Amino acid sequence: MYFRFANNSDVDTIYNWSNDPIVRASSFNSNKIEYVEHVEWYNSRLQDLSSIFYVFYNENDVAIGLVRIEKKSDETIISIMIDKNQRGKTYASEMLIQASTDFLKNNPNEIISAYIKIDNIASLKSFKNAGFSNEKKIMINEIPSIVVTKSITL
């Protein structure tokens, strides 16, 4: 498995991944994303140095999914999407390891946070297997959730 950074040619693939019913159900905003809004958002994120999109491929050069890391003013947030045809193949944890390792290598003082709906057991397991810890139950928009974090430990 390997990654490359997203570019303009990924806009449609990421749009399709984002609107997959399982991805929408796992998101805190489960509404369908309109294409025009997605293109505008995606292009702005590509120009924003605080957003990093890691597009992952398997050994057969088939696109697996995306890990996005976004530095905000008060925290750094990570999220993951996997192509519906690649789910269940245990890619998620390795994708999270590679993306978070790359990010923390270049941002060693950052703490990466993942926000996960409490009923998304598979996602929580993937993050824990990728070294995310400090599990804390929280509410996000009245949705029971969990936050886990990862940083470089000295």
Image (cartoon, rainbow, N blue to C red):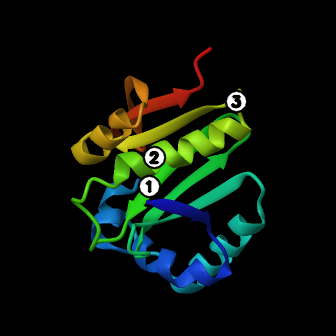
Q: In this view, does 115 lie to the left or right of 123?
A: right
Side (left or right) of 56 relative to 102: left
Among numbered discs 1 and 2, the one appearing first in the sequence: 1
> What residue is drawn where x is 24% and y is 47%?
122
Quadrant location, the N terminus = bottom left
At a point 64% along the width and 43% down the height, the residue shown is 103
In three-dimensional space, the C-alpha distance between marks 1 and 2, rounded to whole angstroms, equals: 8 Å
For residue 113, side relative to residue 95 (left or right): right
Q: Can residue 44 be seen at all in this image of the molecule?
A: yes
**Circle 3 sits on which residue?**
108
Asked if the residue under mark 2 is in contact with the one under mark 1, i.e. CB atoms within 8 Å, the reply is yes
Task: Please state the horizontal and vertical placement of residue 145, each as a whole percent of the image.
Answer: 35, 37
- The residue that mark 2 highlights is 96
Circle 3 SS class: loop
Q: Position of residue 85 (x, y in %)?
A: 27, 74
> Can see residue 142?
no
On the rendered image, what quadrant is the C terminus found in?
A: top right
Earlier-in-chain disc, 2 versus 3: 2
Give the mark toward the camera: 1 or 2. 2
Residue indicated by mark 1: 80
Residue 132 point in image, percent of width and height: 43, 31
The answer to whether the residues at label 2 and label 3 have Cβ atoms under 8 Å apart is no
Q: What residue is shown at x 42% (from left), y 32% (from top)?
A: 147
